[in-house]
Structures are given as C-alpha cells and as structure tokens.
Image (tube, rainbow, N blue to C red):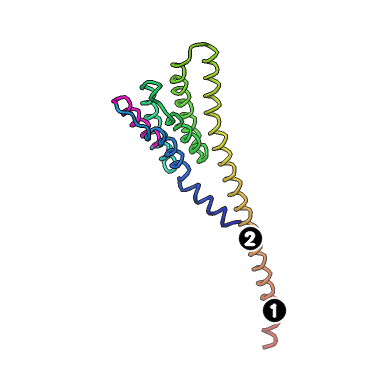
Amino acid sequence: MGTRTTTLRRFLGSGAVEVGLAGLLLLPDVLPFHPGTEAALALVAGVVACAGAGLTAWRPRIGAVISCIGFGGLALLPAELVGTTLYAPMIVILSCAWHGELWTAGFTSLWGYLVSLGLTLRRTTTAAQDAQAMLLWCGFYALPWVIGLALRRVELTESHRFAVRAEAQRREIAAELHDNLTHELAVLPRDVVNS
C-alpha cells in the first residue's frame, strides 16, 4: 500500500499531470492544422498557452504568465480559430491551487474568465445567452479550484499524518532508550559492588 502511494505521489509531483493535460489540449489544435496566417498565429498562441500551462508544474508564476500571454493572443483572433487550447488556463489554476500559489491561480482565473467570456460573447445574440455564458464559464473556472484545493488538502493531510507517525516513533524510541539506560544505571552499582 505504501509503495503504491509513494509511486502515485512521485508521478503526480513530477509534473506529468500538467504536461499531459497541456499536451491533450494542444493535440486537437495541432492535428487539423489549416493553412493561413491567422491559423498559424492561433497555433502559435495555443502552443504558448499550453507550454505555459505545462511549465506551472515547476515554475507556477512563470508558467501562468506565459500561459496568460498565449491565451491573450488567442483572444485577439477570430473565435472560430480558437480550439481546445481555450482551456489552458484551467490547467494553470489546477496546478497553482494544488501547489499553494493561490494569488497566481486567482489572477489566472480572472484573466481566463474575462477572455473566455469575451470570446463567447462575440457569438451570442441574446441577453439570455450572455447570462448563460457567464454562468457556464464561472462553473468551468470553479472546477479546477475545487480539484486543486482538494489535492492540496490530501497532500497536507498525508504530510500531517506522516509527521504524527514520525513523532510517535520518535517517542517510542526515546522511551525504549530511557528504559534501557535506567536499567543499565540501576545495575551498574551492583556490578561495582560485586567486583
């Protein structure tokens, strides 16, 4: 059981989650590449956004800035050219919330929400659709917070349990040493008298 937990923790802590999710987001945009300047710019912006999202595993603030720059580039393009890389800020939020970079996650959430909403509002025609888009994007940007904070809570709980177990083991060893030393000191005068 401990080996599986250690292996899982090593895998999750290695950045594989962030890089894997960023790659999955980028793949649908890369495969059906269309020629043209705007399509090439969309691909470059998507690569920058996803590269920044993957980088958040090791450098959360730098990765968030890079991802937001790429995401801002996507906002300048026509909405039909923006693909799945639209969700790159959610990887940044997940990673930052998970690793305790809450201000970075908050800034990325705000930026991502505003850009996503702006891209969506270009396509809506009624106030009801606008309200629906606002609510939908709010839910989309809340989800990585929930998952990231839950992962962080699990890690903190596990580290607390480990510290409690280590302290209990330390106390047990100290008590055993105390008993052994007390016994040896009690026997010492008897051994001196017998000699």
Please give the residue where the numbered disc 2 appears in the rendered image.
169
| Residue drawn at the location 69% of the way across and 79% of the way down | 187
- Give the farthest residue toward the left: 37
The image quadrant where one finds the N terminus is bottom right
Q: Is residue 49 magenta?
A: yes
Residue 20 position by quadrant:
top left
Amino acid under label 1?
Val
For mark 1, does the 10 Å Cα neighbourhood hold few (<14), some (14 to 19), or many (20 or more) residues? few
> Which span of residues is magenta-colored?
36-50
Q: Is residue 188 magenta?
A: no
| Residue drawn at the location 52% of the way across and 19% of the way down | 133
Closer to us: 60 or 5: 5
Q: Position of residue 79 (x, y in %)?
A: 40, 21
Amino acid under label 2?
Gln
The image quadrant where one finds the C terminus is bottom right
Q: Position of residue 7 (x, y in %)?
A: 53, 54
